Image (tube, grey):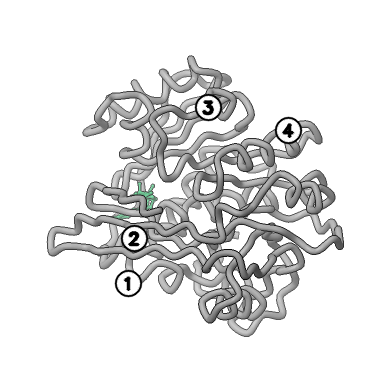
């Protein structure tokens, strides 16, 4: 099936998958991201900096799938739970950006939608012993929800990004997400409130808290983020640095990936500081073209981010 998606000048180009894993359970305690969206490159090019992410996921037995798995390995990302199926082609996303920066993303989920809850069970050990579990909606929503529930039951921090947005999102997503992070387009689809300024973002945040979220982050492109939480109900704007954006496709994934990293490895940082740092990482990604190719390696980032 084709799922056209429209972004407002920004987009989330992503190729992601759904997983079936091999039955070897390993726990490493880093972020776990069911599906194959690859948010942020942590290792050195050529790998070798240790496994920091686990990906229960699935790709097709085709050249895209082979390349994808190789690419993950090259970057030190575990593929222990990435299956290759002959039942569907590797998921793809075609991104068209016009001269005004408007984009339309056509997703062909392919193998992504073959991930099922049994596959998650095979990866239960890594999910339940992870430091953070990140989910979004490019795999079957029920499978994402199940991963959040598994993590939640084990006291694992959950970070949810409702992309691509669903107007009829299962309300359990709000309660099983420790952090609910959406962009302006997703915020509008979920709440009906068009987000054109900081006040709108605050309204959206409050509405999502009322639905059961504990902490909401609305990403606002060049404006950074709005954060609101049950603990700090006065919304806080965390601005992004001024940069010359070349291509903002994938900025949201870059932000979420960076946030997952800080949650996992610097859990004691105040949330506002994690968001500020994640803004910095994402703002680096918008200064290069492409999606994954625009994500910085750790070695390319300023030292004060660590
Ligand atoms: P999405 O890619 O999901 O549409 P956003 O466009 O809201 O997400 O961007 C996510 C994050 O990327 C922002 O919160 C900000 O940190 C960073 N970012 C995006 N666009 C810019 C920009 N033009 N300048 C600086 N940072 C940006």
Q: Is residue 20 above or below residue 159?
A: below
Give me the residue at 42% from left, 59% from top. 108
Tell me which numbered mark, 4 or 3, is placed earlier along the sequence.
4
Image side of residue 151 versus residue 34, left or right: right
Give me the residue at 65% from left, 59% from top. 57
Depth check, front residue: 264 or 36: 36
Depth check, front residue: 5 or 111: 111
Question: The residue tagged with tag 1: helix, strand or loop?
Answer: loop
Extreme-front residue of the structure = 87
Give me the residue at 75% from left, 61% from top. 21
Q: Which residue is mark 4?
A: 152
Label 1, label 4: how many angstroms apart (C-alpha)?
A: 36 Å
Label 2, label 3: how many angstroms apart (C-alpha)?
A: 27 Å
Q: Which residue is mark 1?
A: 289
Q: Which residue is mark 2?
A: 249
Label 2, label 1: how many angstroms apart (C-alpha)?
A: 8 Å
Tell me which numbered mark, 2 or 1, is placed earlier along the sequence.
2
């Amino acid at each position: 099936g084709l799922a056209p998606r429209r972004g407002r000048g920004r987009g989330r180009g992503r190729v992601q998958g759904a997983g079936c894993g091999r039955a070897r359970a390993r726990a490493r305690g880093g972020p776990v991201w069911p599906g194959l969206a690859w948010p942020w490159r942590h290792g050195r090019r050529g790998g070798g900096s240790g496994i920091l992410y686990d990906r229960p996921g699935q790709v097709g037995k085709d050249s895209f799938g082979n390349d994808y798995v190789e690419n993950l390995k090259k970057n030190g990302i575990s593929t222990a739970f990435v299956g290759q199926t002959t039942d569907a082609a590797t998921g793809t996303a075609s991104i068209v950006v016009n001269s005004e920066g408007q984009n339309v993303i056509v997703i062909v989920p392919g193998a992504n939608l073959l991930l099922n809850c049994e596959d998650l069970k095979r990866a239960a050990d890594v999910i339940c012993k992870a430091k953070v579990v990140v989910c979004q909606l490019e795999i079957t929503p029920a499978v994402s929800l199940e991963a959040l529930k598994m993590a939640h039951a084990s006291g694992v921090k959950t970070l949810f990004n409702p992309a691509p947005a669903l107007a009829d999102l299962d309300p359990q997503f709000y309660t099983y997400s420790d952090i609910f992070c959406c962009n302006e387009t997703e915020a509008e689809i979920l709440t009906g409130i068009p987000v054109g300024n900081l006040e709108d973002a605050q309204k959206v945040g409050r509405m999502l808290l009322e639905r059961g979220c504990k902490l909401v982050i609305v990403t606002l492109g060049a404006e950074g983020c709005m954060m609101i939480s049950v603990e700090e109900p006065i919304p806080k704007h965390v601005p992004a640095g001024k940069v010359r954006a070349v291509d903002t496709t994938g900025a949201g994934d870059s932000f979420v990936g960076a946030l997952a990293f800080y949650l996992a490895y610097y859990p004691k940082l105040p949330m506002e500081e994690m968001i500020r740092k994640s803004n910095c990482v994402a703002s680096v990604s918008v200064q290069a073209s492409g999606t994954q190719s625009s994500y910085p390696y750790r070695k390319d980032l300023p030292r004060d981010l660590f």
